[in-house]
Structure formats: structure tokens, C-alpha cells
Image (tube, helix red, strand yellow):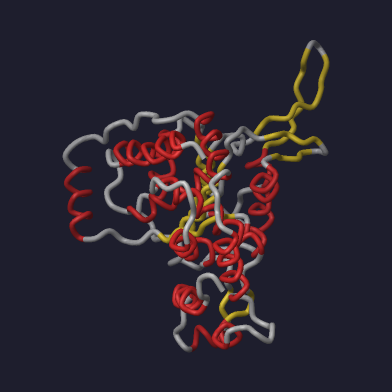
Amino acid sequence: MEREAVEKIKGARDRMGVELAKVIVGQDDVIEHLFIAVLAGGHCLLTGAPGLVKTLLVHSLSQLFDLSFCRIQFTPDLMPADITGTEILEEVDGRRKMVFVKGPIFANMILADEINRTPPKTQAALLEAMQEHQVTAVGVTHPLKEPFYVFATRNPIEMEGTYPLSEAQLDRFMFNVFVDYLSEEHEVAVVSQTTARAPEAIQPVFSGEDLLAFRDVVRKVPIAQDVVRYAVRIAAASRPGPDNTLGFVNDWVTWGAGLRASQYMVLGAKARALLLGRSHVNYDDIRAMAYPVLRHRILINYRAEAEGATVEQLIGRLLDSVREGQ
């Protein structure tokens, strides 16, 4: 791989960080995961309490790459056609005909705000768009703009009036990024900054065409077969049932990670390596991707909950149990 491409992406991280610092304070891990998802071409689920700049962060990302942005507020009465679009009757040249009016999903970056507040029927309207980057309406397929991303937010606190996302829907998201509260120093900085002056405008660093080129570079990053096998074994170790399954997995897990987990760990590891200025992937890259990739793909059971076990703890034990180069 050309060193020039590696340096360009590494420099992109520094420039994007400078621009984001105009409106975002702290949340370094969250920002890194979002950068990785964007470079890898994956969709992202952001889980966190209200008021933790999730919406602002996604909007700022779209500005960094000069992408069209659309925020969709998911509510119980939202219908699939409100997202994808619908046909209306129009008069053209003295004749009436049905014309497809595109919905808000026809943008480069979609923010599905509080996605778990709308029924499964409407949530499912995103499935085809996220997987095939297209929308089918009345038997006609409409391609979406490229690059295309879905960033969805989810509030883990309020469960009343919410609808859990199906496993098929969750699996379409490359990462589940947990957005936590800021440290005291960062919170002081935010309060001081936002109450003293209006926020600075974020200047685009790259275009959508640049982003598509970066995504091609990410896929060309070399990775040793042993490192790929390590990612596959981590995902496979999360699945209960087989005779050689780890004991705590059989005790705690109802459903483990599928094939997309291995793919996204490897793809994310490639993007992370480039952001850190390396032209190859190592085991640390895979381990760093394990948490955001696996935390929404492993379903723990009632026994785990009764024992106070969490998905985060389970992933940590998986990483401790699966050795490198096995």
C-alpha cells in the first residue's frame, strides 16, 4: 500500500479532530469509533442518555465531509412511507400520473433519532436501505446517494413506550457506540464554552468523493491470516451450544455474534490502523473493535442478569480466553 495514502488518512484524523473541537469537547473514544465507521462505510448505533451531544456529533460529521444530512425523529406514529417516500398524483402536460416523491432517507447521512420509539414495521423500512443502499417503492427500485450512512440514537434509560430493535436490524449496524457522561473537567469546559459565545462553524475537510476513495484504501490494508482467524474465533467463542464452547458463554448467552461480527472487526481494524498511521493490522486493532462490534450482537440470558453479569464483562472474558495465534 502506498505510504502517501496512509499519511493522508492519518492527517485526515488530525484535521477532523481540530474541526470537531470547535463544537465537541471530550468523547474521544466515541469520536474515534465514528471516524472508523465512516472510513469503513458502516452504520452506527449510538446509545446514551439525552443531552450527550449525539445529534450534534452526527451532524458535525456530515459537515466535515460536506455530506447532505437529514434528521428523522422516530415517533410511534411514524409510517414507513414517511421515511422512504411515497407516490402522489400529479398533473404533467395536461395528463395525470403517479410521481414518486423521495423521503428524507435520500440523503448521504441519516440520523434516526430515538429509533426505538417507532414500531418494528417502520424500523424495518431502514433494512433495505442499510443493506442494499436502495429503496423499493411500488415495485420500483430507487438507488440512494453515495456515500450513504445511517446513524441511529437510542436512549437506554426510558423503556416505556419503546420498541426493541430486532436482531436483524441490530446486525446491520457496524458499531454500537456507548456515549457516556463527560468528566468534570470536560463538562466545565463545555458549560464555559457554550455560555460564552456562539459555536464556530465547522468547515468541510473532505468531500464525499474523498470519503469513497478512503473507503477503497481501507479495504486494501493488508492483514495476516492469523489476525483474521483471531477475529473469527472471538466471534465464534460468543456462540453457545458447541461442545468446545466456553463454560461462561453457555451459562450466560442466549444468542451469540454472527458472521458480520468477524467482518466488521476486521474492517474496523483496518480503518483504525490507517488512522493510527500504520499500513497493516495487528491484534490490538481487533481487540479495540471487539466491544463496539459485539455489544449489540450478543444476547445475554436471565441467569446472566440475575448474577449481575453484563455484555461488557462477557466481551472482556472472551478477549481473555481467546489467545492470539491459536
Q: Is residue 13 left or right of residue 291?
A: left
Hey, which quadrant is residue 233 in on the image?
A: bottom right
Residue 57 x %, y %: 39, 45
Residue 320 x %, y %: 46, 77
Judge whether 88 appears above or below 173 on screen: above
Residue 14 x %, y %: 33, 40
Q: Nearer the viewer, residue 234 or 122?
A: 234
**Number of callouts:** 0
Residue visible at 56% across and 48% down in the picture: 42
Judge whether 169 appears above or below 91 on screen: below
Judge whether 140 appears above or below 129 on screen: above
Quarter occupied by the C terminus: bottom right
Q: Nearer the viewer, residue 175 or 282?
A: 282
Residue 29 x %, y %: 36, 56
Residue visible at 49% across and 36% down in the picture: 2
Q: Nearer the viewer, residue 299 or 69?
A: 299
Hey, which quadrant is residue 138 in on the image?
A: top right
Hey, which quadrant is residue 237 in on the image?
A: bottom right
Q: Is residue 265 left or right of residue 191?
A: right
Residue visible at 74% across and 32% down in the picture: 87
Residue visible at 51% across and 67% down in the picture: 295
